[in-house]
Image (spheres, helix red, strand yellow):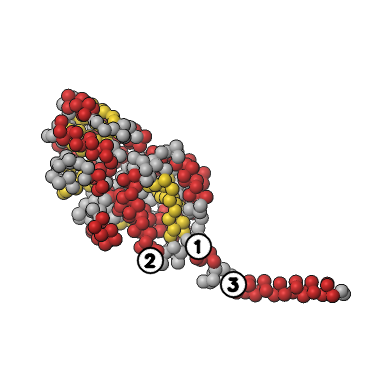
Amino acid sequence: MSRTHVLRCLSIVATSLTLAASITACGDGKDSGDSSSGKDIVIGMVEDTSGGTAATSAEASTGISLAIDEINKAGGIGGRSLKLIRQNDGSQPSQTPAVLRKLVSDGARVIIMNSSSASAQQVKPVVEQEKIVAVSATNIATAIAEPPNNTFSFILANPITDIGTVYAAAFKKIGVARLAVITDDSPTMAGLNKGLLPIFEKSGITIVANEKAPLNSTDVAPQLSRIAAAKPDALFVSSLGGQLEVLFHNTANQIMPDLPRISLASIGNQPDTWKLAKPGAFRQLVYASAISADNTRSNELGEKLKAKLGAKYLGLTAFAAQGYDTVYLLKQAIEKAGVDSGPAQVRGGLEQISAYPASWGRQGFTMSFTSSKHVGSDGLCGIVLRRFNEQNQPGDNWADYQPQCS
């Protein structure tokens, strides 16, 4: 045997011994030295930082961030930290599929939809193809959680059909027979109004005026003057909130100061916009809140956010509470599916969650999911009707009507 051949053999033996030692040190992958045990659990979030739902998205993000911080400080899930990765779609549904796919390619195991309802609807086929759970923190479009392509799509909040049912009953209670509507021209509101307004009409309400304004409007006096001429019993404001809805109320308060006004949830959950309202412009405005002083979990969450935000804290909003609960629901789903489960298995874990105590809604309100129920809300008591006070701040629950809790 040549000297070269001997050296080659010795090298092979040495390499083999080193490899064997490495395998022995690694063990069977179950001990603390397993590198997989240190991997983050990646949550992808589609958010809107620049479009019509930016204010809503920011509020939900506050609750989402708090929940992730709490879970990580408590040891994460199975010893693994949560890592949030974010992509902005600007509330442009045509952009959302590409944004979501980018999150998946970056390792997201689950998706939080924190943009518009139209965006959440647009990606239903995508999450179906990718077999990854997408939970809408604040969206209320019923179609998000309904067939087709709803196997991996979930929502927390009461859908627009529930809100329509509650408001139709409220209108009947206070004697509203002639209703005027003003809305923005966003794709989200176009879709929501298709589900909402027919419920009003089927309940016997006549819509005497239906006006629309672009999101970038600076003058809505013509629309509201036409509404005043129609002599409605009340004005229903159906919008994404933000500066445009403030403009609606500032103008309506000038033209029809005594006409009752009712809105959806957005304006009551966007504290940064309230300062844009003229004095008394929100006076007695009723809106679909989901925060009630009788819910101890809401009060506890409010104290946590106040401690975290300090002077920036302007009060607990439903969107912050729903964002917070979204993360904890996903935590439970991952725990039920197994910390090493793939994205598709998380769906099964989510569908096993029952009677989760919500941080929003009335005291005792819960959320549940099953294979045939992808809307979390258990009943109508996720909806709390509240009024603004003279200082343009959310005030008491509306005394004239509240949905019955079952």
Q: Nearer the viewer, residue 379 or 67?
A: 67
Q: Tell me what residue is drawn at x 24 percent, y 57 percent.
A: 311
Image coordinates of residue 321 in percent, x first then y, are: 30, 53
The answer for how far apart the CA atoms under marks 3 and 2 are is 29 Å
Amino acid type, callout 1: Lys
Quick check: 203 left or right of 337? Answer: left
Of the numbered discs 3 and 2, the one sitting upstream in the chain is 3
* Image height of 4 relative to 281, above or below: below
Drawn side of residue 53 relative to residue 122, left or right = left
Dot 2 or dot 1: first in sequence order is 1
> Marks 1 and 3: which is nearer the front?
1
Image quadrant assignment for residue 177: top left
Q: Which mark is drawn over residue 84?
A: none
Q: Can you identify the residue that label 3 sits on? A: 27
Which residue has dot 2 on it? 73
Task: Kindly indicate the quadrant of the structure image that contains residue 205.
Answer: top left
Q: Residue at x 48, y 53 (%)?
A: 108
